Image (tube, rainbow, N blue to C red):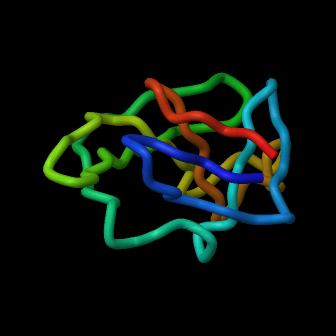
Amino acid sequence: MRAVWNDQVIAESDDTVVVEGNHYFPLASVDAAVLRPSAKQTHCPWKGDASYYSLEVAGATNADAAWFYPTPSSAAAEVQDRVAFWKGVTVSE
């Protein structure tokens, strides 16, 4: 699978985990150079507390476009150390 935003590949992996229709990429497969920490946090009743990254590519910023669960619940352990994308990021094969 490949995640692309602003015409740049930001993640690529043959080892994604699909949860609720979202592909979670291993953190090691994400281009760390495009990730910017975000203060945004949300809560999922069954996965736990999510943190976010903004993406910065070619001078453009996509705020809070990637999320991850630093300490997912035991029910969502499969997303540990993985990142998912939204907000215009195209995920495809």
Quarter-wise, where is residue 5 in the image?
top left
Residue projecting furthest to the left = 59
Residue projecting furthest to the front = 7
Name the spot of residue 11 as percent of width and height, x first.
Answer: 58, 60
The front one of 6 and 40 is 6
Is residue 15 depicted above or below 52 in this figure?
below
Residue projecting furthest to the bottom = 28
Is residue 15 depicted above or below 86 in this figure?
below
Is residue 22 depicted above or below 52 in this figure?
above
Please indicate whether residue 69 sits to the left or right of residue 26 in the image: left
Name the spot of residue 44 as percent of width and height, x first.
Answer: 60, 26
The front one of 79 and 62 is 62
The front one of 81 and 14 is 14
Give the total number of marks visible in the rendering. 0
Please indicate whether residue 87 sits to the left or right of residue 93 in the image: left
Name the spot of residue 1 as percent of width and height, x first.
Answer: 78, 52
Residue plotted at (49% across, 58% down)? 10
Quarter-wise, where is residue 23 in the image?
top right
Please indicate whether residue 92 sits to the left or right of residue 31 in the image: right
Residue plotted at (22% across, 42% down)? 39
Name the spot of residue 14 as percent of width and height, x first.
Answer: 85, 64
